[in-house]
Image (tube, rainbow, N blue to C red):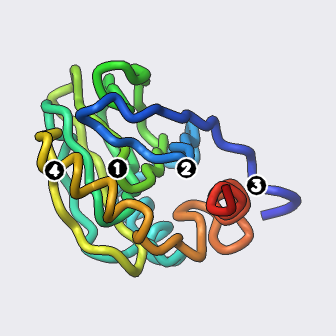
Amino acid sequence: MNGEPPAPLTFSFADDGAIPNNRLPLLFYRRGIDLSGSAAPEDIIESAFTANGWGRDMWRNGIFPYVHYHAMIHEALGVARGHARVRFGGTKGEDVDLNPGDIAVLPAGTGHQRLAGSDDLVVIGAYPPGGKYNLCRGSRHEHAQALVTIPQVPLPASDPVFGATGPLPKLWRPATHD
């Protein structure tokens, strides 16, 4: 790739008492991976995530229709097929329309929920090395635990779309020195 990778849109969400979110911003790449003309868009996204160090425990599915978050690991979501409307950040978050090639990178604790989606929706999910998958739904006990575990989640060394020289290391590292 020539020059700098494109800057992602960033979203920051406050703790709403149920969903802790994270002081690190959610990164969103509109058409972050070019899928045009591909008969196997899932393979393209999986290859990109793997090549950039985010190939751990990859899955193909959709996005749960209820608010949830992961308090012990960061997550990348790549839309391979179909479209969805997803709320990031919990009930006071931001509704975003996702289409093929769109990539969302969620720091641990970021709430997300599929509000609507096409029948052919296929999302690729992936995780960086470090951290442990868990599913939290926003209970008081989970929230209290999450406030302890989220700051302990290791920062990834690379961006799932653009690798070690991508925007993620630059955008997430400075926020750790508050």
Amino acid type of the residue that numbered disc 1 sits on in the rendered structure? Gly
- What residue is disc 4 on? 142
Q: Is residue 8 left or right of residue 40?
A: right
Examine the rendering and report whether any part of residue 37 can be seen. no
Disc on the earlier residue, 3 or 4: 3
Residue at 29% in and 47% down: 123
Q: Position of residue 48 (x, y in %)?
A: 50, 67
Q: Whole-Å distance between the Cαs marked 3 and 4?
A: 36 Å
Residue count near mark 3 (Cα–Cα under 10 Å), binned few <14, some 14–19, many ≥20: some
Disc on the earlier residue, 1 or 3: 3
Q: Whole-Å distance between the Cαs marked 3 and 2?
A: 19 Å
Amino acid type of the residue that numbered disc 3 sits on in the rendered structure? Pro
Query: On the image, which quarter does residue 134 sit in?
Result: bottom left
Q: Whole-Å distance between the Cαs marked 4 and 1?
A: 11 Å
Q: In this rendering, which labeled residue sits more in front, label 3 or label 4?
A: 4
- What residue is disc 2 on? 24
Point out the image quarter for the N terminus.
bottom right
Disc on the earlier residue, 2 or 4: 2
Amino acid type of the residue that numbered disc 2 sits on in the rendered structure? Leu
- 145 lies above or below 69: below
- What residue is disc 3 on? 5
Please identify the residue farthest to the right as the structure is shown. Answer: 3
Q: Is residue 107 left or right of residue 121?
A: right
- What residue is disc 1 on? 109
Q: In this rendering, which labeled residue sits more in front, label 4 or label 1?
A: 4
Q: Nearer the viewer, residue 150 or 11?
A: 150
Residue at 65% in and 55% down: 175
Examine the rendering and report whether any part of residue 26 can be seen. yes
